[in-house]
Amino acid sequence: MLRLFQHYIPTSLVWLIFIESIVLFASVYIGVELRFMEGDLASKQLLEPLLPKALVYTFIMGGAMTAMGLHTRNVVDDFAGIMIRIGLSFFIGFLASTLVFYVFPGWYLGRGVFGLAILISFFGILITRTIYQKVDKYHIFKRRILVLGAGKQAAILCDLEEDARKGGQEIVGYVHVDSNPVEIPEDRLLKVESTLLDLAESHDVDEIVLAMDDRRQGFPLSGLMECKMKGIFVRDLLHFLERVTGHIELKALHPSMIIFSSGFTKAISPGSAKRVFDVVASLVLLIIASPIMILTALAIWLSSFGRDPVLYGQIRIGLCDAPFRVLKFRSMRTDAEKDGAQFAKKKDSRVTRIGWFIRKTRIDELPQLFNVLKGDMSFIGPRPERPEFVLGFEQKIPHYSLRHTVKPGITGWAQICYPYGETEEDTRNKLQYDLYYIKNYSLFLDMTILFQTMQVVLFGQGAR
């Protein structure tokens, strides 16, 4: 995997994005050649310079594909799913391109060239995706991994071998190097017959992962130094799991790793760039979504004949454990919590008919844009939780309080990677994604989350 702006991206996915960008870029030039293949050089010259127009087209269409989830870790692996997402991508890209050409006429390609570019790139992307799936199926980009350790820490990785394999990481085996009990199947154990380097070279190892329960026993320092000098990477278990799963594994996280890690600082003190991003993104979305918000408010008001409120305010815990009132469109009955605070459930009887729709489409979250403008929330960040639940979570889930070192957000890494949770175990799992965001924060990661949130909304993932 490659690490781009603190965020891990599978190497195969980077290659896919690069090749698809070439396809999109080249389709503009091919479209021009096909459109004017019979001559008419004067009209062809009117399109010059073509380079910036091709770049704009590539950026818009590539962004639309990212928004439809085509550039995520788990790319859709069936033909029907690919066709639906590519079709939606090109429809959104077509609308976005038309808007851009209207605002900036100098970038307009002309109807003939634009139509041909759309057609050529659509089939080009479809062919590229088909080839990519065939290549990725056989893990052409795989890395061979040797694990030092066979105890509890190594067992965490053993349980996630399938995820590692999907991410292009093939674990060749485990080496028992300390006196702790073995928790790895015997057929997965390897023995060091001569030296650690010989074992690594005999299995064509690219990387060694340290997963020992106690590094004070049997730590092969000289062997690891030999391997590193030969170009074999040495990684800590936590960082390897982070790369494979896209989250911080709580079972492998120790306070010392937080202290000595290169991360866990940028999200806590992100500077003015994140605030500018929050304000701009919120204002743009408010302008775009204002008709939807007005219609939603009217529908909620009419559904109760004006008796019940349209907006619902709820106390949540924000930055530095400070409480604030989050705004949402009311999606439940006014007596929904007469028995006390509780998580929303599947097919929750408290949800109104209009509420079901606005929760499914995430329209109920739109008033939180005002919380972002006010400064209580960020556009991207961990979802704010209710004080009734926070105290219990902090007592039962290690490192839960780290969520409150950053501003909460309307959407976040956990929201696009994990479905809606209603249990303590779900909260624990989502915390692992929130910690990944806090550790690896960058504006690039914010933009990635923003794009991928669109596919979560459109495909109704995780809503209750």
Image: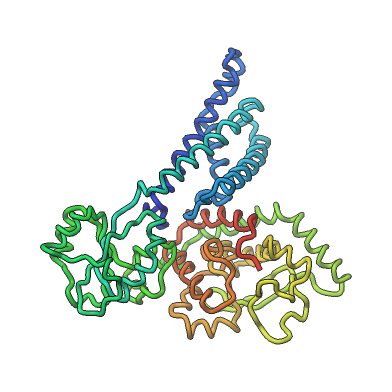
* Image x and y of residue 90, in percent: 61, 41
What sort of colour scheme is used for the picture? rainbow
Residue 64 visible? The answer is: no
Which residue extends farthest right?
A: 305
State left or right for residue 448 relative to residue 439: right
| Up/down of 448 relative to 221, above or below | above
Q: Looking at the image, which residue is at 59% across and 47% down?
A: 80
Residue 70, position in %: x, y?
Answer: 53, 49
Task: Choose between 218 and 327: the one closer to the eye.
Answer: 218
Res 370 quadrant in image: bottom right
Q: Is residue 182 left or right of residue 258?
A: left
Residue farthest toward the front in the current orientation of the protein: 187
Q: Residue 359: in sight, yes or no?
A: yes
Residue under the point 37% across and 52% down: 2
Q: In the picture, which quadrant includes the C terminus?
A: bottom right
Asked where in the image residue 187 lies, by quadrant, the reply is: bottom left
Residue 165 placement, left or right of 209: right
- Pinpoint residue 66: horizontal percent, then vertical percent: 54, 48
Residue for point 75% across, 73% down? 332
Tell me the residue at 36%/71% (across/down).
156
Q: Residue furthest top?
A: 39
Q: Is residue 274 left or right of residue 148?
A: right
For the image shown, how many numbered marks are present on the structure?
0
| Residue in front for this viewpoint, 149 or 69 | 149
Q: Is the residue 144 above or below the residue 396 in the image?
A: above
Farthest left residue in view: 194
Residue 98 is situated, as x and y percent measured from the top left of the image, at: 66, 37
